[in-house]
Image (tube, rainbow, N blue to C red):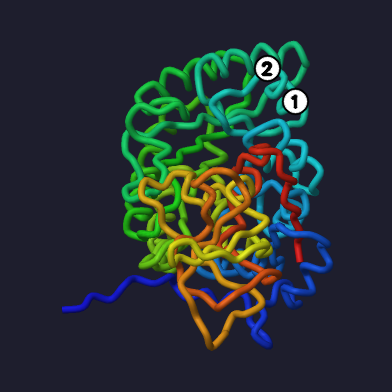
Amino acid sequence: MTTTKPVHFPLNAFPVVNNCLQVGGQPLTRLAERVGKTPFFAYDRALLTSRVQHLRENLPPEIHLHYAMKANPMPAIVQHMASLVDGLDVASAGEMQIALDTPTSPANISFAGPGKTESELASAIAAGIVINLESEREMESAARIGLSLGYQPKVAVRVNPDFELKSSGMKMGGGPKQFGVDAELVPGMLKRIGELPLEFIGFHIFGGSQNLKAESIMEAQEKTLALAIRLAREAPGPVRLLNIGGGFGIPYFPGEQPLDIAMIGGNLTRQLPDVKRTLPDAQLVIELGRYLVGEAGIYVCRIIDRKISRGQIFLVTDGGLHHHLAASGNFGQVIRKNYPVAIGNKMHAAKLETVSVVGPLCTPLDVLADRMEMAEADVGDLVVVFQSGAYGRTASPSAFLSHPNAAEVLA
């Protein structure tokens, strides 16, 4: 009995013309000449736009979309996304400055993270950004800093829910967590907010990320909305912002299938009447990062050597884990699995071979593809790693072994 080996979900977002991948309407080979060097990350602005349109078509119109900049804070991408979404979410002072350079109103920018410094809090308060409070200390600090500056801080409480997002790649809520305030402690914190010179805005409730099961996301959203309604009874004012997080995943590995957004949208439509009735002033926000930008980006490196070791073919490239830690399998994977990888200038070659694609670093961890079948390639050809628009360059150890940084381009 034979079993079918799982394969990557077909990636058809980037067209192929004359055997060459097209990015931003131009051949990959020409884009590489335009960039002037490899390796580089390339992001297709048309794909970014179409992803937001896909969400708008499938989610209730009352839902506001926020872009979580930690997925990809490249300034050009943030500027483009700011023109498409309703708000931005930042996780550092550096991201905050990039967000403030966009036309987005500070009132539609929120700041999350469990270790905000006093200088970061001061900058956010002065800018008028919504601070997602993650501890009682942070609450007291924000009130004190606001008084010293003469501005009333806008705050929401980030809640660590008493449930988790099942089947998520990374759990951000439920159980003991460094993120947010445990749900059972929030009522006491809300009482204290009412006593301090703080402007209460609402809640941020986020359970996990990289989830491909619509049923799990729907269940978590239902529990999130119920928790928000329950906590709102203890709030010092009306809930004007209810950020229910995101968690929407994209398919990376063999056997994975895309998330069914229509199912999620239909379930939210059924939930909204109750939310509107109990929280009439609340703006309902879904915060997404990876889902918005992940599939619109590729990582491109050039083959600099081809060698055979005891029968195994290795394509040695000028890029690797120092630029793209996630693709190497060293960013959250327990058992290493291959991202979708191809020879970008030989997308439909007649002759295929099984190869391993490795980088130039002196470590056996520097592997971009392990024994994958792809077009027969040689020195000078371009290797493409798909699904690279999120958590690529900025989530990688770029200083490791002191190789040059990868370039970035929005095409």
Q: Quadrant of residue 56?
A: bottom right
**How many numbered dots are placed on residues in this image?**
2
Q: Which residue is mark 1?
A: 123
| Kind of residue at badge 1 | Ser
Judging depth in this view, the residue of 357 and 294 nearest the camera is 357
| Kind of residue at badge 2 | Glu
Report whether 31 appears left or right of 69: right
Q: Is residue 25 above or below residue 166?
A: below
Q: Which residue is mark 2?
A: 118
Q: List x then y, in percent, for residue 184.
A: 35, 24
Q: CA distance from mark 1 to mark 2?
A: 9 Å
Mark 1 vs 2, N-terminal side: 2
Residue at (39, 66) in percent of width and height: 254
Quarter of the image containing the C terminus? bottom right
Residue at (47, 27) in percent of width and height: 235
Quarter of the image containing the N terminus? bottom left
Q: Is residue 352 above or below residue 263?
A: below
Q: Residues within 10 Å of mark 1 (few under 14, many from 20)?
A: some
Element assignment for label 2: helix
